[in-house]
Image (tube, grey):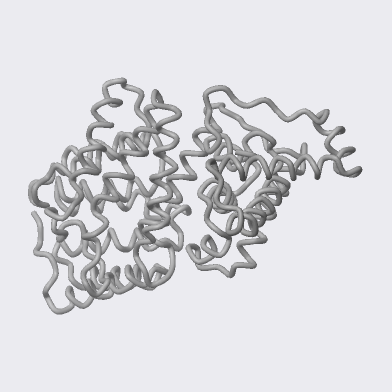
Amino acid sequence: MLVARYRQFDLCEDAVQEALLAAATQWPSQGVPAEPVGWLVTVARRRLTDLWRSESARRRREEESGFDPPPEVPGVDDSLQVLLMCVHPDLSDASRIALTLRAVGGLTTAEIARAFLVPEATMAQRISRAKATITKGGGVFTVDLRAERLAAALHVLYLIFNEGYTASEGGVLTRVDLCAEAIRLTRMLRRTLPADSEVAGLLALMLLTDSRRETRTDADGHLVPLADQDRSRWDRDQIAEAVALLEEVLPRRELGEYQVQAAIAAVHAEAATDADTDWAQIELLYRLLEGLTGSPVVTLNRAVALGMAAGPQAGLDLLDTVAADPRLARHHRPDAVRAHLLERLGDRDGARECYRRAARATLNRAEQRYLEDRARRVQDGRGAPPSH
């Protein structure tokens, strides 16, 4: 609330800490007030006033903004204002994510550091540098509701969810706390901007993807591929909510990448079994997404869908068109996709080698175990049968 109104993150953070300290010492003896949040905000605002009244702070404040707090943005709630502040164009994606989780998600620096497997001191420095970058120009956070800033906010939420759904490093495949936080923040955005089709599309995509979370690993923590997951355990409430969102926004014909990705996930969700999957429709949707994004990762996914719809050789031919793309350098996905297609083609030697290369390239141990297991299965003749 304070940052959204007064913009100065560090001062607001200090003021809230002091208000919390006052509550911790006073409430046990005096009782919890009827409006505890209001009490905290009032005390924190008084502390801010004290800070501004100091000589150096007053001079700096007067020079920067005439001492008057910036006006609130009409129709935009506090959390969204701070989210839009945190995706400042001068920040890297890593800094945007860290600052968003700290300022909007309320995660501690230690929690964010654990989520991204870096020392707490490193994460603290990253957050401090992000705040310094934003305040360096005018000393205050600013809210920008232009389309590019909203797009950046959606991108940051997408990255947070993806990091939670498939952790880039470590032994755990999914970090549930990050997924839940991304969904919560996107719901908040959806409530504030109900007419924005891409916000709804991103929420639908997250819900559809998260609906499969409980079936992605077995009891031993080993990755279970989509084709082998128990679809009866997918969260049908999440699927129904996501499909309703898509049915609301897709007729508007304001297609964006998150809506198309959600539509692809919905096709998977609607198939009772893997064999019932409409791969031809998925390939067409990936082709549409390819045109929207120009991403080689999308082409990798389209190669899988094309391989399922038209045969593995067709998928391999498409894969060859992006295999040398520098954006995919040192990424395990090209080898993993090639291994899958070669396995279906019946080339066990080629598939085994590609699975092994992919396993060496990924830093997530759950994915490493899965890829190494696929290599062993192919070597033992237990892989997928050739597909024609």
Q: Is residue 145 something one can see in this rendering? A: yes
Farthest residue to the top: give it: 252
> Up-down: is 379 above or below 53?
below
Number of marks drawn: 0
Pick the front one: 248 or 17: 17
Pick the front one: 188 or 46: 46
Farthest residue to the front: give it: 30
> Up-down: is 230 above or below 195?
below
- Quadrant where the C terminus lies? bottom left
Pick the front one: 105 or 351: 105
> Up-down: is 278 above or below 325?
above
Quadrant hosting residue 146: top right
Quadrant hosting residue 72: top right
The answer to whether residue 158 is left or right of residue 42 is: left
Which residue: 63% across, 41% down? 41
Quadrant hosting residue 50: top right
Q: Position of residue 115 (x, y in %)?
A: 48, 63
Q: Is residue 282 something one can see in this rendering? A: no
Which residue: 71% across, 41% down? 8
The answer to whether residue 300 is left or right of residue 189 is: left
- Quadrant where the N terminus lies? top right
Q: Position of residue 141 (x, y in %)?
A: 68, 38
Q: Position of residue 6 (x, y in %)?
A: 69, 36
The answer to whether residue 26 is left or right of residue 212 is: right
Which residue: 15% across, 45% down? 309
Which residue: 30% across, 74% down? 369
Q: Position of residue 185 (x, y in %)?
A: 44, 42
